Amino acid sequence: MRGLELVGRAAEPEVRALLDDADPTVAAYARIWLVDQDLEPPESIPPEVLMATLVDQLGRHLDAAGPLATAAEIAAMDPDEAGQLRLVDGLGSASHPRVGELLDVIARYHPLARVREAAGRRAAKARQGRGPALH
């Protein structure tokens, strides 16, 4: 989507066509781009779409920087333990193929014990198929 920044709003028809893409990640990024361009209201992005794109971005961070840096990045998202627990819960409910992998990283490397434990429980559920359906 970064290339679309060069084109700007002129890309709107093509981006809107991506909303019907079979890949939900593509559709999610298209929706976010439309909101960023003030072509759609922010509330048009469902919370589960935001969480799935967060998982996607954290997965890319994991690939580039490794598990320790990714756990530190996640810990820095909210300095409050309760906020971190909500984040783990949200990640655990996301429909994305890398949810389990990210929860495993949090369970192993996060600096807060309660967050590690919560991530471990959510990761186990994802592995057992009791978590969300992955698209």
Image: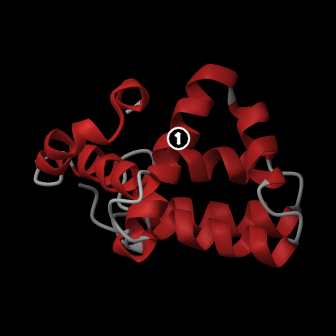
Front-most of residues 90 and 31: 31
Residue 94 % position (x, y): 43, 64
Q: Which quadrant is home to the C terminus?
A: bottom left
Q: Which residue is mark 1?
A: 57
The one of 6 and 16 positioned closer to us in this rendering:
6
Q: Secondary structure at mark 1?
A: helix
Residue at 34% in and 73% down: 44
Q: Is residue 125 visible?
A: yes
Alpha-carbon neighbours of circle 1 within 10 Å: few (<14), some, or many (≥20)? few
Q: Quadrant of the N terminus?
A: top left
Seen from the viewer's position, the closer of residues 59 and 11 is 11
111 in relation to 7, above or below? below
- Residue at 65% x, 67% y: name it: 87
Q: How is the image coloured?
A: secondary structure
Left or right position of 119 against 78: left
Given the image, on which type of amino acid does mark 1 rest?
Gln
- Can you name the residue that lies furthest to the front here? 10
x and y percentages locating residue 89 in the rendered image = 59, 73
Residue 99 visible within the image: no
Name the one closer to the observer, 32 or 91.
32
**How many numbered circles does the render carry?**
1
Residue at image coords 61%, 31%: 62
Q: Looking at the picture, how far across and down is residue 79, in whole percent?
A: 89, 63
Q: Residue at x 70, y 33 (%)?
A: 67
**Residue 52's image quarter?**
bottom left
- Position of residue 70 relative to residue 108, above or below, is above
In the figure, is residue 25 to the left or right of 104?
left
Residue 13: horizontal and vertical position, in percent? 14, 45
